[in-house]
Image (cartoon, rainbow, N blue to C red):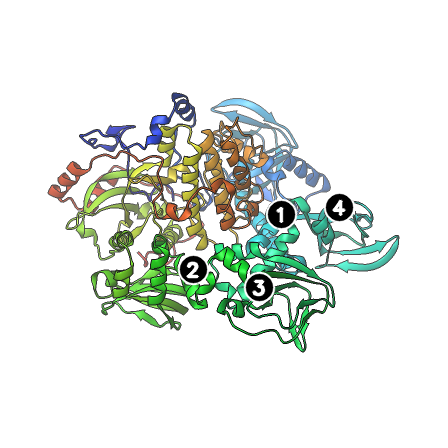
Amino acid sequence: MGNTCKGCLRDDRSNADSAGVVPEPKGQSTYSSHENSISEESKLLRRGTRQNKKKRPLVDGRCEEQGVVEAATAVVSQKTKSQTDIQLIYMAFSNHFILRNLEEETIESVVEKMNHYSIGSRQVIFEQNQPANSFYVLVSGKLEVIVNGVKQNVIKPGTGFGELALIDDRPRSATIKTITRSTLWGVDRKTFKDAVAQVNSMNYQENCNFIYKVPLFENLTEDQKEGLLAALTTQKWAAGEKIVKEGDTGDLFYMIKEGEVLCSQKGKEIRRMSKGEFFGEQALLYNSTRTATISTVDEVKVLSIARDQLMEVLGNNLQQILYRNSQLIAIERSSVLKNLFPEQRDKFIDACKIVNYSSGDIVIPKSTPKNQKIWILLKGKVSAGSKTVNVFDCIGAQSVFKRLEGKYSLDYVAEEDCDVSEISYDEIEARLGGLLGLGVNSLKLLNALKKVQILRTLTQESLESLVRAIRLVEFSNNQEIVRQNDPGNTLFIIKNGNVDIYKDNNKVRSMTKLDYFGERSVLFNENRTATVVANGKVLCWMLQSEDFIRIIDTSITAQLMKRIELQDDTITMEELIGVKSIGKGMFGNVYLCMHKKKKTLYALKSISRKKIASYSLYENLLLEKRILNQLDHVMILKLVKTFKDSERVYFLTEFVMGLDLFDVLRKLGVVSEADSKFYTGCLILILEHLHERNIIYRDLKPENIMIDEEGYPKLIDFGTAKILQGRTYTTLGTPHYMAPEVILGKGYGLAADWWSLGVMLYEFLFCKVPLGDEEDDPYAIYQKILEHRLVFPPLQIARSLAKPLIEQLLSKNPAARTGGSINKLKANKWFSDLDWNKLLCKHSRTPYIPRLNALTSEINKAFVKSLPVQTLVNRSEASEPNPPKRQRSKAPPSNWDSEF
């Protein structure tokens, strides 16, 4: 959607006239102390980087023009390709970095769909500055390349050209004309992208099925399995070939996708394997020599993964990873242990010892006190009389945590070789400090409350008071939890499930786990302002107003008051006064406005229906609204309300006073390690909030982040965001910040955002982006990103600590970027001195506080004029040209604006 979501006030030190306001009379600087330490050399370094802001994504596959026709005079057919044609096309593909990065199966699908073009002499293939549409391979004839009317080159047979069109519809940089009658093979962007998406989507699903069936991987988490999928390589073998040889050292694990293989030892056939079976697991675990030869019976397709790739995704010790994952599964299945907070769970696992028992060994001798130790069976089988203990079963947790008396009356004996995780009561007490004194349910509630954003600042004592005051209530599907206009004195925190919020019978938003509602009635003793309905089974914790007021501190009350102010959706357009225009974008404009009575400032984004129709923004706007309605985070722009009229739709948001991070970086010069850590940590917290809701941002860059009046980042402009269901294939973003998988169109997920964060961290520390910094041409930038030659400038000793983290975030394997999970990313040693809760509560020192323009005189003038905000919008847009007429493939959805 581009730069249409911003409600911000520019720092006037760079250009006071551009903001049209007068600086503070005192002229007092509000830079942090960091600025005084910035060397002139650092400032020069920062000034040496790119000058132009890139507010909107430069590539947006959703808004491409449809119906673009190239080679209009050619005869186009689906002629059968000869072997020579196919070889020619493959050769042309190999010379282009985008195409040669595709898997063979994908290339085959694309080649199959290419059309044959026959065109006469002196005819135009495509024209300079016109939207791009297709990639071509010249088979016969000659073509000339003309730039600005001047002939630059001649294209001869066997050459491919126009490949950037396969990514987006950016205007052609040259005109291509035939010199003689020519024949070509060509593929348009939509056909190409559909073919790539179809093959990769099918392979992704098939590979998912394989991974989930392999016993070796069954204990891995969903994130780890996703990592394996990203690391898998497809190989093809002809009949009679040897995939592995007995006695050779090997580090590859194979899964058979198609065909049959023969397994032999010392020349003697042992067995045959076919689709769905696998071999080579010992090479992954132990890097051992091959114990058999595997030969193909017919043509075989296998999925393979190397040991080093697996280590990149899972860590350095696969066996320990598998043990740890088994412990996590057992903990989650235990009615007692599953209540551990993540940090407590990790400490618990770290304190456990893995003990190996042979068949017949006694694991737990009879007469052992039941409250002495906890055992978790990770491998094998254990029995006690007629009772059988299976893998992931936990023995002793209830007795240890509840301090129950009694002894085991029978020996627990290993029925086969077993691996058992063991931890004593004393070790739990030493690691978790007094944890066993809490009841199981109280422990579970306490740990859940620590995850609720507004409660993170509470002391342990206050949290324990909340635990004693709260009660749990269950609601069935479609049950009303609260009703609009009814009296209420209860705050609700969602434990499990989803709820829908309705005002005047219109759905306005949805909420999910650990979101909360009802704070207005609790604080002001008002009637309910909305109806809340359970969407499926819902469990809520309830807190009465008297307990809330007694326990909650003033800082949390202040947060809630601000939140309530931003949820006042009783506001009407007639109550808003226009102050001034504060931003213009490709699709919409942003205005500063003020509430007549409360004098609260807001930002109003307007998008004309003409532009909505021209660029088919219907679904994009609906998605943006639905995403903003889900978000409630101190470092994310807050949506207040949407409006519509016959001319436009509007987004009313909070007004962020500050400066965007692009300008802040230019002022800071080289950013210190501590300040880079601050900004990176804040962005991780922001992405964590989005990714927990399966929202991918897709255009993370300094221009889309405001530094507010307190010096904290605020993520704005959600026009590119999407709620993910599986993978997405749209090419979208700003080239320097785009992940390789986005460029290639092979499907991508949330991990693309972590790549962008890696680019930004590099940029913080070294004053430039890591790949393609000196390039402006998207083609050249994409090439640098896919080449992936990551080079670090000379580093200070302290900054070298960030190098491994940058390399991790910029891994070509998407799953390796977080190290397995966001918690593991936050546990990276570079962040060892960062207090995440303090950062989230906005209690950390900020690197830079913008000195802001004074708005007093403008607000007073606006109040006197009392200019309706719609009048300001009308005047501002009166001089704008009509949007271009564009051919679109989709008709507008019926009643698309009903949610506005």
**Left or right: 10, with 59 as reference point:** left
Q: CB under 8 Å between callouts 4 and 1?
A: no
Quickly name the residue at label 1.
231
* Kind of residue indicated by mark 2: Asn
Where 827 sits versus 375, above or below? above
* Residue 447, disc: 2
Q: How far is disc 3 from disc 4 in space, using C-alphas?
A: 33 Å
Pick whichever, 805 or 305, lies toward us. Answer: 805
- The Cα–Cα distance between marks 3 and 1, rounded to whole angstroms, is 27 Å
Q: Which residue sits at x=47%, y=24%?
A: 148
Residue at (58% x, 60% y) in the render:
423
The C terminus appears in which quarter of the rendering?
Answer: bottom left
Outermost residue toward the bottom? 386
The residue at which mark 3 appears reads as 330
Classify mark 1: helix, strand or loop.
helix
Quarter of the image where one finds residue 516? bottom left
Q: Position of residue 38 (x, y in %)?
A: 37, 26
The residue at the point 41 percent across, 39 percent down is 678
Q: Secondary structure at mark 2?
A: helix
Q: CA distance from mark 4 to mark 1?
A: 17 Å
**First along the sequence among labels 2 and 3:** 3
Query: Can you identify the residue that label 4 sits on?
Result: 250
Please tell me which of labels 3 and 1 falls first in the chain: 1
Disc 3 packing (10 Å; few <14; some 14–19; many ≥20): many
